Amino acid sequence: MSFVRYLMLLSLVVWVGGLIFFAFVLAPTVFHPGMLPSRQLAVNVVNRSLGILHWMAISCGVIFAVTSMIDSRVVNGVAEPFALRNLIVYAMLILTLVGMFGIASRMLVLRQQMGIIDDVPHDNPLRVEFNRLHHWSTRIESTVLVLGLGLLFLVSRRLS
């Protein structure tokens, strides 16, 4: 059973750690003035990284949900698909899917229509919509991070 709990905890740590690294290390580093030759290159790095992070999140969420139910079945004799920890990970997965397929895909289309975003005036309707979606993307990723930190606390408390 300890291997199941290890996988459950590892999947959560990889997901939350990835979000922390992305938000507090990768994005600020590549957008730091003079770090890369162009801002467009920074945008490309962040977009590719976020896409990979989303797929990792989906994988980790599925692994967490499955191992969490296996762990609860062994402890209580019956799976608990609606235990609080599972509800939280389901919410994290749903938000990740919305961010990935709803918001990020629309932002990509807008970016392609605009070309180099820094050359587009701030009052251009495409850029206004892009900025609005970017704010929603940031809110969603922040919410997933907060939920993940709460879930990590919940799980660590249960394992002690």
Image: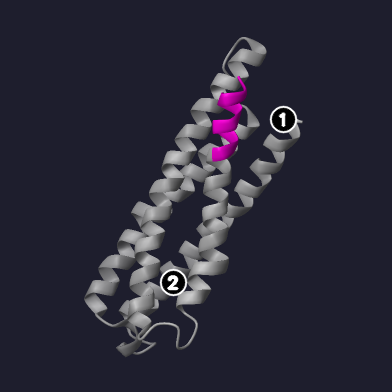
Q: How many marks?
A: 2
Residue shown at 77% from the left, 31% from the top: 160
- Residue 81 visible in this rendered orientation of the protein: no
Residue 48 numbered mark, or none:
none
Q: Amino acid at mark 1?
A: Leu
Residue shown at 41% from the left, 51% from the top: 54
Q: Which residue is mark 1?
A: 159
What colouring style does the render use? one colour
Please tell me how crowded label 2 is: few (under 14), some (14-19), or many (20+) other residues with Cα within 10 Å: few
Which badge, 2 or 1, comes first in the chain's sequence?
Answer: 2
Q: How many angstroms separate mark 2 from mark 1 (CA)?
A: 41 Å
Q: Is residue 104 above or below residue 158?
A: below
Read off the magenta span: 1-10
Q: Is residue 111 above or below residue 98?
A: below
Q: Amino acid at mark 2?
A: Arg
Q: Nearer the viewer, residue 96 or 8?
A: 8
**Residue 86 is inside the magenta segment:** no
In terms of secondary structure, where does tag 1 sit?
Answer: helix
Residue shown at 40% from the left, 82% from the top: 36
Task: Specify the principal SS of the magenta part.
Answer: helix
Image position, residue 30 (x, y; %)? 45, 76
Image position, residue 24 (x, y; %)? 57, 67
Q: Which residue is mark 2?
A: 132
Q: Nearer the viewer, residue 42 or 131?
A: 42
